[in-house]
Amino acid sequence: MDNKNGRILALDPGDVWVGVAHTDILQQFSFPYATWKRDSFFEEFTRYFSINKVSEIVVGYPITMASKVSKETEKVILFKKLIEEQYPSMPIFFQDERLTSRYAKSAKIFGFGGKNSDHAIAAAVILDTYLTKRSYNK
């Protein structure tokens, strides 16, 4: 889908925190946005939607290095279903997130990401990967 009518939002869901990143309005660059507590995710999500127009959502898909589904993968699938129930017309896609947390920690060591948490930086890496893949598929 090539919907240019809003930002693309990326989520890196964990058990306690959800890293959030988004694109600029032209959908060319990814930026760490915030880290939200999982138990208040939908309140923050609703607040974000009241301020920003979103055209699609990308959710980090945690599969193992051997490309196998894990308990974490199953949790993320359920998380995506909850979002789909709340926003049934919103396109939501998975993006492989292997090694994004490690990359986010490395980026912080080298001074990238500013005050953003590892979770938000990991979401930006997920989003950047998605944008790159999307540009090659055009």
Image (cartoon, rainbow, N blue to C red):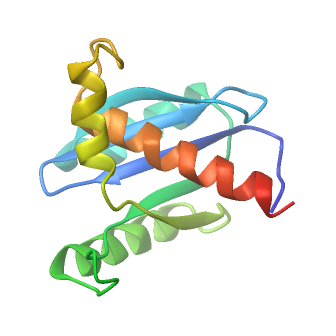
Q: Residue at x 28, y 86 (%)?
A: 69
Res 80 quadrant in image: bottom left
Task: Please state if 110 lies on the left or on the right of 46 as rendered.
Answer: left
Give the residue displayed 39% in from the left and 38% down from the top: 20
Residue 45 visible from this viewpoint: no
Horizontal arrangement in the rendering, residue 125 relative to residue 131 (left or right): left
Residue for point 46% across, 35% down: 21
Q: Position of residue 28 (x, y in %)?
A: 72, 33
Pick the front one: 8 or 138: 138
In the image, residue 41 above or below residue 75:
above
Residue 29's spot in the image, x, y percent? 65, 30
Q: Nearer the viewer, residue 45 or 104?
A: 104
Q: Quadrant of residue 25?
A: top right
Q: Position of residue 128 (x, y in %)?
A: 56, 42
On screen, 111 above or below 83?
above
Question: Which residue in the rendered view is the most extreme toward the bottom?
Answer: 68
Q: Quadrant of the C terminus?
A: bottom right
